[in-house]
Amino acid sequence: MTTEQVILIERMEAAVALFGSFDENIRLIEREFNVKVQNRGAELVVSGEPENVALGTRAINGLLAMINKGEDLSDQSVRYVLSMVRDGKEGEIEALAADSVCLTSKGKPVKPKTLGQKKYIEAMRKNTITIGVGPAGTGKTYLAVAMAVKAFRAKEINRIILTRPAVEAGEKLGFLPGDLQQKVDPYLRPLYDALFDMLGAESYKTQLERGAIEVAPLAYMRGRTLDDSFIILDEAQNTSREQMKMILTRLGANSRMVVNGDITQIDLPDGKPSGLVHAVRILKGIEDIGIVRFTDKDVVRHKLVMEIIRAYEREDKKK
């Protein structure tokens, strides 16, 4: 049995944004839910099996809600909305679009793109220490830097400290050219990139020279007390238990800390336990420490990244 559902579109700009380049968004909805979508002036007509039409209609209404909140639709955001509709969570789409962390140096708002990211941002706002665990591409580092920059601009803290362990991912530090700082710089590059995006190269350089921003390997943190700071530990899965305890206990007065990592990409020598895995286990339930777990649905990179993560997860389960 075939049925139809009519959706009224009040603004032509909304229709243009909804359809996307070469109608790619509508084609995706048609393939995903096995429906036909036709444009009749100010109306969209969704036709097909009743259950499929209901899903397609909810997806279109969800995308229109995002557009009306000023969101630019990307292939990733459209696919995420479709997955939310399948999970019956489309009611949370509008709240997702409304949230904004800060502006980049080019004036672009930084917003959570998934429910996992929204939960992560809320945890950073609420807790002194936040631990984010999840696969690559979920925005753990980028959003943490955004929150640090927001706190810095609001003068809630005086310094941003970004650090990560210099653990080789199949490569040896000794073969890299230069002094120690030059050797570890490649490991810190994702942190530099996020800061450049938020502050701009000139502002970043100025704050770095003032000492308001510090980007350094984890070993440089030993013996210090970090007051009035926003501390971000990235790639925390490659810390030992001792290193994790060391950085967590550096926390000083009026400081906040975010610890990020992907426990499926541990580059420590075989048999050496990860400090991140250990910390998640023993710190669970402690007040003012938030732990957020991301899934493959929170991946905001190319759609193939999500498929690659799922393929590796399936292989790991077989083993």
Image: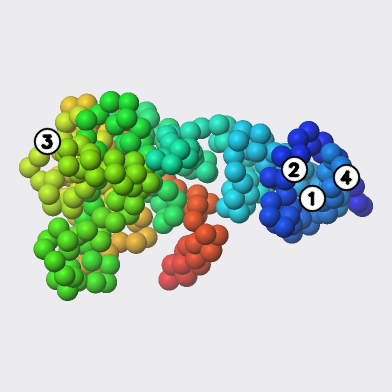
Q: State the image coordinates of residue 77 (x, y, percent, origin top left).
A: 59, 48
Q: Is residue 164 left or right of residue 293?
A: left
Q: Nearer the viewer, mark 3 or mark 2?
A: 2
**Is there any visible trace of residue 102 in the rendered image?**
yes
Please report whichever mark, 1 or 2, sits nearer to the chain's N-terminal start.
Answer: 2
Taking depth in this image into account, of 197 and 171 the one nearest to the observer is 197
Q: Write down the residue under mark 2.
A: 15
Numbered disc 1: secondary structure: helix
- The answer to whether 199 appears left or right of 275 in the picture is right
Q: Which mark is residue 225?
A: 3
Cα separation, mark 4 vs mark 1, equals 20 Å
| Residue in the image at 36% along x and 55% along y | 262
Q: Which mark is residue 89?
A: none
Q: Earlier in the sequence, mark 3 or mark 2?
A: 2
Q: Separation of disc 1 and disc 2 at Cα? A: 21 Å
Disc assigned to residue 52? 1
Residue 272 drawn above or below residue 203: below
Mark 1: amino acid: Asn
